[in-house]
Amino acid sequence: MEYLAEYGLFLAKVVTFVVALLIIIVAVAAMGEKSKKISKGHLEIKKLNEHFQHLKDDLQHATLDKEGLKQLAKEKKKADKEKKKDKEKEIKPRLYVLDFHGDMKASAVKSLREEITAVLSVITDKDEVLLKLESAGGMVHAYGLAASQLQRIRDRGVKFTIAVDKVAASGGYMMACTANQIVAAPFAIIGSIGVMAQLPNINKLLKKHDVDIELHTAGEFKRTLTVLGENTEKGRDKFKQDIQDTHELFKDFIKEEREQVNIEEIATGEIWYGRQAIAKNLIDQVMTSDEYIYSKVDSVDIIQVSYEVKKGMASKLGLAAETTLDNAFGKIWERLSQGRYFS
């Protein structure tokens, strides 16, 4: 019982701290909005072919002697002439490179949707889209939206590849399945096709201290399990059924997008590393994103696209506080609200 009392005190402190931080964030953001409007976002475009060529040139200039540099200059001049002729004959296909770094709320989808819209406005059937994906998953509805954004690329009929260097698990793997091809680093974490939801209940502790909790709902299952109230078997069964239903939807999505997997074998919540995942048909090639991109450097124009939003000082302070809050208390706060998570 002492443990429960300590846990209840800790929980109260956490909630108090979270509320205080939220008040500060809202106040700072409101002050910033009054003094200065946030600038609209803009696309940042980087030609990676030039980046790779600069790396090569820098290393050659540092290692070659005088005669070697003269010979290199002659070869470069000749190559530039040939490239100019090739450009006049035919325009190279393009590889558009996007990045997605997912958090629990899939916040990066705000930029991703703009990047996809921009790319689809100019893309041709000869081009390809590569998404460098890193995410361990998060909230169901957030990653459902992220996957739907990626389906826009598939629906366009162009080649779509997703590369995973570290992790694409749970909702992250749900996103990856929308691609025509998935490549992953040897030790990238893949899979975790499951759903989880958890929350504490301190009703017994409250009763011990003669604290009554009243919860009124309109609708039998408006609230199934609670943190403070007394939970029932009927509510508990409904809660479990909701999780199972969400898992079935998750499995159906994977089957539709990636028919070659044995869904019953892999939909256990387990994870596999890249070298193991290929045997389960979870991915198509074991390869890093750098290796994939560099393999295309001579045959296509590689263009990195990112959507950036310029923020004022107040917004930066608010974002920093929100990030800290999300990392430290996000899981506790969301699960107290009965959020469901891909896991």
Image: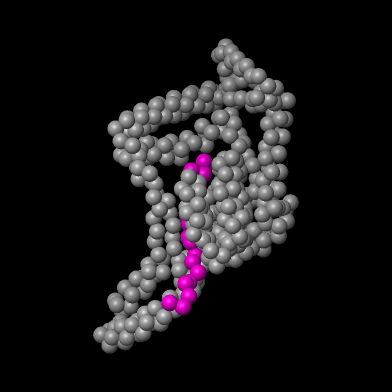
Would residue 58 appear left or right of 114 to someone viewing this image? Answer: left
- Residue at 71% x, 39% y is 245
Q: Quadrant of the N terminus?
A: top right
x and y percentages locating residue 337 in the rendered image: 56, 30
The tally of labels here is 0
| Residue range (magenta) | 88-107
x and y percentages locating residue 304 in the rendered image: 44, 60
Q: Is residue 313 magenta?
A: no
Q: Is residue 150 above or below residue 72?
A: above
- Residue at 37% x, 36% y is 318
Residue nearest the viewer, comparing 230 with 161: 161
Please indicate, yes or no, whether residue 207 appears anywhere in the rendered image.
Answer: no
Would residue 121 appear left or right of 203 to someone viewing this image? Answer: left
- Residue at 56% x, 33% y is 335
Would residue 340 appear left or right of 314 to someone viewing this image? Answer: right
Q: Quadrant of the C terminus?
A: top right
Q: Is residue 243 above or below residue 55?
A: above
- Residue at 35% x, 81% y is 76
